[in-house]
Amino acid sequence: MTVPETVAQPGSGVETDTGPGLPEAAAEVLRPHAEHAFADELTALAAADDRPRPARWHLSPWAVATYLLGGTLPDGTVITPKYVGPRRIVEVAVTTLATDRALLLLGVPGTAKTWVSEHLAAAVSGDSTLLVQGTAGTPEEAVRYGWNYARLLAHGPSRDALVPSPVMRAMARGMTARVEELTRIPADVQDTLITILSEKTLPIPELGQEVQAVPGFNLIATANDRDRGVNEISSALRRRFNTVVLPLPATPEAEVDIVARRVEQIGRSLDLPAVPAGADEIRRVVTVFRELRDGVTADGRTKVKSPSGTLSTAEAISVVTGGLALAAHFGDGVLRPGDIAAGILGAVVRDPAADRVVWQEYLETVVRERDGWKDFYRACREVSA
């Protein structure tokens, strides 16, 4: 598995090493890219993978799906799951990337859209860094190309003065580009993707040239389905995508497993206590989030009001990670109700007026009466006072 080239942003004043000879400090980053963090698994999969691979793919579609869903290779290598959910969703997403249609990952906040897109790009192209981050201020240059104005003024328009976007570089190299939060990007900038995705061409009218995509190029976009009406995707652009909806975890057990896995990974990088020390509290956080999300208790007997927030799996991971940090630095290293109470309050009460009423009602009608939850009830009452 080769380490992809690391490119400094033009004008950033930051120089970076490229290739396998990365300096030691670069190997100790807080959050490595997927292709670095799971390089051993990708290498093992590539060695065991004898199935047909599309042009310029590092792995076959079967191996990409195995990388995301986990499994055990013939040599005994264990591939850890990166996504816990329906297998068919992953298979459709991977198959889409092997066609000429782009992939749109759609879902509510916290359903691992960014996580899945990163790992798909890492497994398919060996490089997940060809990324456009969508915001309300994302310019057209971020999707197409920009200019090095010093060279432009000195020598006029030329390929040397052109600054390629991640999408342009992916087209030229036959790799996978990523666009995060597509619906956050202004509609006119979104539509610059139409020609790229339909004609597989990016015109450069200033030079009378164009960049044509080579085999292997494709694009993964993510979008939050709660952002409808912010910058709605045009029907013309939407037709260029195959949309895959990532659902919330189907069962409490699946969500607990996801939270535990991610908290363990994050905790290792932060030197936090092991997850088993807080397994009961992880289950409690997931239970609270699911009940408030669904508007009914787990046993189906009591209806509850839902707050304005999403209470996603990603937020549960954040609450538990924050609780573990409290336990490590201001406690005995064991996750307890007092460590997670403030995090839950912050996740639930987004609207100080309406959400606080919802939370207080849930505490008094559900949490207070639940066996084994007295410590949690007292901790929540203390931080809510």
Image (cartoon, rainbow, N blue to C red):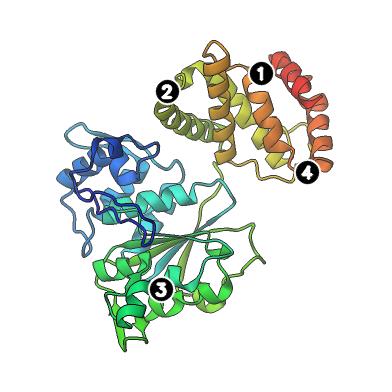
The circle drawn on residue 338 is 1
**Residue flagged by tag 1: what amino acid is it?**
Gly
**Residue flagged by tag 3: what amino acid is it?**
Arg
Q: Residue furthest front?
A: 154
| Callout 4 crowding tier (Cα within 10 Å): few <14, some 14–19, many ≥20 | few
Q: Nearer the viewer, mark 2 or mark 4?
A: 2
**Residue flagged by tag 4: what amino acid is it?**
Asp
Report which residue position mark 4 lands on. 351
Please tell me in which quadrant of the rendered image residue 11 appears. Answer: bottom left
**Counting residues from the N terminus, which is met first, the one under dot 2 or under dot 4?**
2
Residue 236 image position (x, y, % from top left) = 52, 79
Report which residue position mark 2 lands on. 271
Q: CA distance from mark 1 to mark 4?
A: 23 Å
**Counting residues from the N terminus, which is met first, the one under dot 1 or under dot 4?**
1
Please tell me in which quadrant of the rendered image residue 5 appears. Answer: bottom left
Report which residue position mark 3 lands on. 144
Q: Are marks 2 and 4 in contact (CB under 8 Å)?
A: no
Query: Which residue is located at x 48 percent, y 51 percent?
Result: 113
Residue 373 image position (x, y, % from top left) = 70, 17
Q: Is residue 291 visible?
A: no
Please tell me in which quadrant of the rendered image residue 130 appears. Answer: bottom left
